[in-house]
Image (spheres, helix red, strand yellow):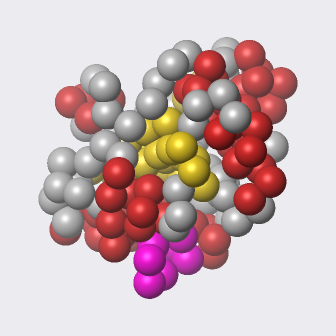
Amino acid sequence: MSVVGFIGLGNGGSKLAGTLVRSGAPTMVLDQDLTAMAPLVAPGAIAAQSPADLARNCGVVITCLPSPAIVSEVMESTGGVLAGLAPDSIWVEMSTNDAQEVVRLGAQVAELGTHAADAPVSGGCHRAATGNILIFAGCERAIFE
């Protein structure tokens, strides 16, 4: 199984990433607040050093960030996700974002020979904590599977 990378360990992201760790999925995590990573690293997640480091080491990269501006920074900055994405990897966008920004970044992801999935969630943090959240996956069927 490929390593799943998770960037953004706030209210929802920490719970979603926690479900991956609890299920035994190989998981790498990153947050600007290093203390947010500790509860996931203790039971087995790997701490990433940067968005590019995480992207280089993961077949799936999930972003769960609080704004379009932060998503753009994490994706496009020097040392960002785009700098590390390997061909055929998958970027899954679960952030608070807008459609135009997801399409714009998705085009950059595709130029690298990688894949994008727009995957907003519904159900709140309490449902994310139990692993019982609704995820709307917008992508090609093969990427979904």
Q: Is residue 77 left or right of residue 57?
A: right
89 up-or-down from 128: above or below: below
User: In the rendered image, is residue 138 in sight?
Assistant: no
102 up-or-down from 3: above or below: below
Q: Give the residue at x 26% y 48%.
A: 89
Q: Give the residue at x 56% y 26%.
A: 20
Q: Give the residue at x 65% y 39%.
A: 41
User: In the rendered image, is residue 55 in sight?
Assistant: yes
Quarter of the image with the C terminus is: top left
Q: Nearer the viewer, residue 24 or 85?
A: 24
Q: What is the quadrant of residue 26 in the picture? A: top left
28 up-or-down from 114: above or below: above
Q: Is residue 122 left or right of residue 44?
A: right
Q: Provide residue 19's location: percent of width, then percent of height.
A: 63, 24
Q: Nearer the viewer, residue 45 or 127?
A: 45
Q: What is the quadrant of residue 44 in the picture? A: top right
Determine if the magenta segment contains residue 79: yes
Q: Give the residue at x 17% y 55%.
A: 87
37 up-or-down from 85: above or below: above
Range shown magenta: 72-80
